[in-house]
Each structure stands twice: as structure tokens, then as C-alpha cells.
Amino acid sequence: MAGVRLHGKYMRDFTRLALNRSGVEITTCPWTRFPSFRLAGREIARFYSSRGLDLRLTRQVIVQGKPLFSADARIELRPSKSHWLRFNLRRSSDVAIALELFELALQANLADLLSDGEPHSR
């Protein structure tokens, strides 16, 4: 984690807990300079601000979860073909929800990587 700058309590709390997950590596996102989380070299989450987290859930998971995701004001869905959604942390209790989404991203991307060994289109 050397060299990765953590800004704010939510980012610090999330990062500390996310790094307890097996296989998760942290780097600095070249676009935001905030933490980026990787699984087997694939970026699966990144902070875009001290309270904003982008998560790569895969297209299949987003399609399946769209009714729930759309109902949550903290979640922003991207255009129809995206594998990513945005989660905005508004209070301390949102860190636990962000971790649940992160776990979902871990499982979805692990399954995706194992299915053919190659990342699917973004």
C-alpha cells in the first residue's frame, strides 16, 4: 500500500477492510490518483473521490440487480453496456454497503476470469 494516498475516513475504512479479502491488490488509479483495487490484475473497484467508489460488477450482475440498484439513490448506473456502477458514500454506515458491493464485484469478476481466463469487454 506504499505510495497510495488515502483521503478521508470512508476511504481509509473501506480500504482497510477491502484489503482483508483474498487476492485483492491495491494500486493508485492513474486517472484519479486515488486507490484502485485489483483481482488477478483486473481493476474491480476504484475511488473517484474521497466518498465515491466505482465498482466493476460485470454486465450480467448489473442486469440482474438493476431493479435494486436503480432504487438506491446512492447508486449511479452507467450507460447500458457498462460493467461498472458508481456508489456514493454519504455516511459511515455506507462503508458496510460498499463492502457488500465490493464482495459482489469480487465474486462476479472471479467467475468471469475463471470462465475463459480472459477479461471480457469493458
Image (spheres, helix red, strand yellow):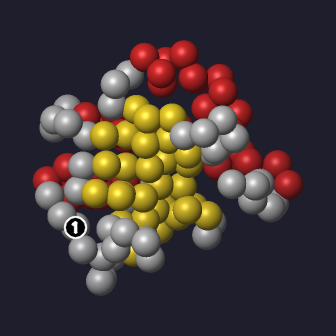
For this view, does 43 lie left or right of residue 11? right
Residue 59 visible, this orientation: yes
Instruction: Looking at this view, name the residue that lies furthest to the right.
Output: 116
Residue 114: x and y in percent read 77, 52
Q: Quadrant of the C terminus?
A: bottom right
Closer to us: 75 or 92: 75
Marker count (numbered): 1
Closer to us: 41 or 50: 50
For this view, does 102 lie left or right of residue 99? right
Residue 75: x and y in percent read 40, 32
Q: Secondary structure at mark 1?
A: loop
Residue 60: x and y in percent read 70, 33
Question: Against 75, is 113 above or below?
Answer: below
Question: Against 55, is 39 above or below?
Answer: below
Q: Amino acid at mark 1?
A: Leu
Instruction: Looking at this view, name the residue that lies furthest to the bottom.
Output: 3
Q: Residue at x 61, y 69 (%)?
A: 41
Disc 1 packing (10 Å; few <14; some 14–19; many ≥20): some
Q: Residue at x 51, y 35 (%)?
A: 77
Residue 22 visible, this orientation: no
For this view, does 110 lie left or right of residue 3? right
Q: Mark 1 highlights which residue?
A: 6
Quarter-of-image position of residue 105: top right
Q: Residue at x 50, y 41 (%)?
A: 85
For this view, does 105 lie left or right of residue 46? right
Question: Against 100, is 21 above or below?
Answer: below
Q: Residue at x 69, y 41 (%)?
A: 81
Q: Quadrant of the N terminus?
A: bottom left
